[in-house]
């Protein structure tokens, strides 16, 4: 039997499952062109974000399909971003992760701090063998977060979205490659 998700607590942050009441704050930063430039979200309005959160509430972390956690700044209780994890149906042991920090809170190490906790959770609680992140090849901030939590670049690939070409990268960290930081 699965147990309820226990929030992940770091020095400055708390990561808990997103709830419908988070939709407004999440929609606000996702609607910023600087935030969604490299992301695949189709809709960023409050209603769509809320519907997505409600759908994800039916899944457990590690299941195929995304489960999102809201990133809360412990000192203020403010929602400063969100991270997600997603089991891969045809690749048992692989967990994909994603991350977003609201512009007002970027550059403080929050992305890295949240991801360290998420990666540790994926290995230690979910039993993942591989943690994987995809990013746009131009998204340097995202690459840096992946590198800082110990992931390494394993693939550069060309993809098409609505006929438009873009280059992506895949970062991975294998269980056996973990260092003490994660
Ligand atoms: C990627 C993202 C989560 C980073 O969050 P953050 O809290 O600012 O990250 P950190 O403060 O932990 O910084 C991590 C590293 O990225 C670097 N970095 C941050 N923004 C950067 C930028 N715009 N350009 C280059 N490097 C950047 C930081 O300098 C740091 O590296 P360093 O320690 O070597 O200096 C944030 O920029 C974001 O949400 N972007 C929009 C959404 C997105 O693209 N998410 C990733 C999708 S795969």
Image: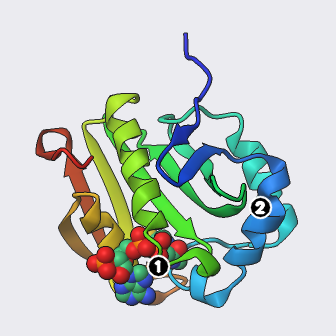
Image quadrant where residue 55 sits: top right
Question: In the depicted view, which residue is nearer to us: 165 or 34?
Answer: 34
Residue 179 picture location, percent across and down:
15, 47
> From this viewpoint, which residue is outermost toward the front?
75
Q: Secondary structure at mark 1?
A: loop
Q: Is residue 169 left or right of residue 5?
A: left
Q: Position of residue 5 (x, y in %)?
A: 59, 29
Residue lying at 27% horizontally and 46% vertically, measured from the top left? 182
- Check disc 2: other Cα within 10 Å, few if <14, some if 14-19, many if 20+: many
Horizontal side of residue 129 vs 51, given as left or right: left
Q: Is residue 167 visible?
A: no
**Where is 100 relative to 90, above or below?**
below
Distance from disc 1 to disc 2, alpha carbons, whole Å, reads: 25 Å
How crowded is the residue under tag 1: few (<14 C-alpha within 10 Å), some, or many (20+)? few
In the drawing, what numbered circle is on residue 107? 1
Q: Quadrant of residue 25?
A: bottom right
The percent position of residue 135, horizontal first and vertical second, equals 38, 72
Answer above or below: position of 92 versus 155: above
Q: Is mark 1 within 8 Å of ligand 1?
A: yes
* Ligand 1 falls in quadrant: bottom left
Q: Nearer the viewer, mark 1 or mark 2?
A: 1
Q: How many marks?
A: 2
Out of 103 and 126, give the one closest to the viewer: 103
Location of the N terminus (image quadrant): top right
Residue under circle 2?
49
Q: Secondary structure at mark 2?
A: helix
Residue at the (49%, 87%) spot, across then down: 163
């Amino acid at each position: 039997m699965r147990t309820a998700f226990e929030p992940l607590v770091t020095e400055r942050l708390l990561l808990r499952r997103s709830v419908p009441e988070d939709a407004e704050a999440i929609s606000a930063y996702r609607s910023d062109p600087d935030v969604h430039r490299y992301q695949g979200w189709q809709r960023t309005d409050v209603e769509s974000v809320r519907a997505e959160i409600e759908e994800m509430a039916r899944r457990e972390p590690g299941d195929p399909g995304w489960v999102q956690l809201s990133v809360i700044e412990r000192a203020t209780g403010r929602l400063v971003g969100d991270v997600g994890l997603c089991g891969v149906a045809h690749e048992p042991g692989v967990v994909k992760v994603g991350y977003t920090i609201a512009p007002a809170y970027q550059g403080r190490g929050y992305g890295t701090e949240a991801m360290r906790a998420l990666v540790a959770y994926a290995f230690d609680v979910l039993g993942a063998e591989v943690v994987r992140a995809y990013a746009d090849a131009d998204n340097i901030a995202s690459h840096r977060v992946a590198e800082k939590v110990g992931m390494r670049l394993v693939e550069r690939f060309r993809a098409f979205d609505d006929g438009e070409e873009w280059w992506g990268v895949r970062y991975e960290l294998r269980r056996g490659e973990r260092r003490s930081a994660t």
